[in-house]
């Protein structure tokens, strides 16, 4: 279906606003998803506070160029953007990674923008695997607590041996 020049201009302006917002943007290839799966995906993203948008590759590349990005990555397949503005950094990547596990061959990360830099597939996949801040805090507390707990157990064994 042909899109009018006015509609294309509007899409490019919207994409430029997304890129300029400073939000993390994940480029995904969604080739093979049917309507039911796409609806489910959109619902999950919305519940997590993450936005999902489908756009033509040519319009995405043009918006990237107009936003000041020099080296535009290869965007294979059908492209969608997953982005989040008002949630924890990397949340868009985590949600994309979760969906990618669910729809293995139909949905994949192809690159993205993080902290104003264009990143390739490998970098975005590795960023998407970083746990949330709450999980990292819990892991940190566990690491700090472990030696103290070991010391408490050793002291209790010594006390039992003396009795």
Image (tube, helix red, strand yellow):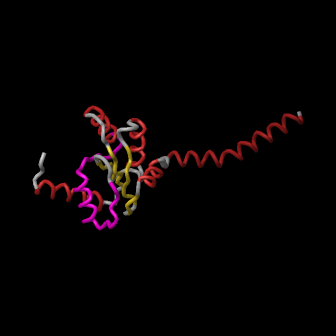
Q: Residue furthest right?
A: 162
Compare residues 30 and 113 and report the one nearer the observer. 30
Of residues 52 and 149, the one nearer the viewer is: 52
Query: Between 144 and 31, which is closer to the camera in this rendering?
Result: 31
Which residue is depicted at the point 41% across and 53% down? Answer: 121
Q: Is residue 48 magenta?
A: yes
Name the spot of residue 15 as percent of width and height, x first. Answer: 24, 56
Residue 16 shown in magenta = no
Residue appearing at x 30%, y 37% in the figure: 32
How far across and down, in percent of the image, does residue 98 sit? 42, 40
Query: Residue 104: x percent and y percent?
Result: 40, 37
Q: Which of the two residues, 57 or 92, is positioned nearer the viewer here?
A: 57
The region drawn magenta spans 47-74
For residue 157, what is the image quadrant?
A: top right
Q: Tell me if 88 is positioned left or right of 17 in this view.
A: right
In the figure, 110 relative to 62: above or below? above
């Amino acid at each position: 279906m042909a899109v009018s020049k006015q509609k294309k201009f509007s899409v490019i302006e919207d994409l430029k606003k997304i890129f300029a917002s400073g939000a993390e943007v994940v480029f995904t290839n969604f080739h093979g998803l049917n309507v039911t799966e796409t609806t489910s995906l959109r619902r999950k993203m919305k519940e997590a506070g993450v936005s999902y948008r489908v756009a033509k590759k040519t319009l995405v590349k043009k918006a990237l160029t107009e936003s000041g990005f020099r080296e535009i990555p290869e965007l294979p397949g059908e492209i969608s953007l997953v982005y989040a503005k008002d949630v924890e950094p990397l949340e868009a990547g985590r949600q994309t990674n979760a969906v990618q596990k669910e729809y293995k061959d139909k949905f994949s990360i192809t690159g993205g923008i993080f902290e104003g830099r264009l990143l390739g597939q490998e970098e975005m996949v590795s960023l998407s695997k970083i746990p949330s801040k709450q999980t990292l805090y819990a892991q940190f507390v566990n690491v700090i607590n472990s030696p103290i707990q070991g010391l408490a157990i050793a002291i209790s064994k010594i006390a039992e041996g003396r009795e």
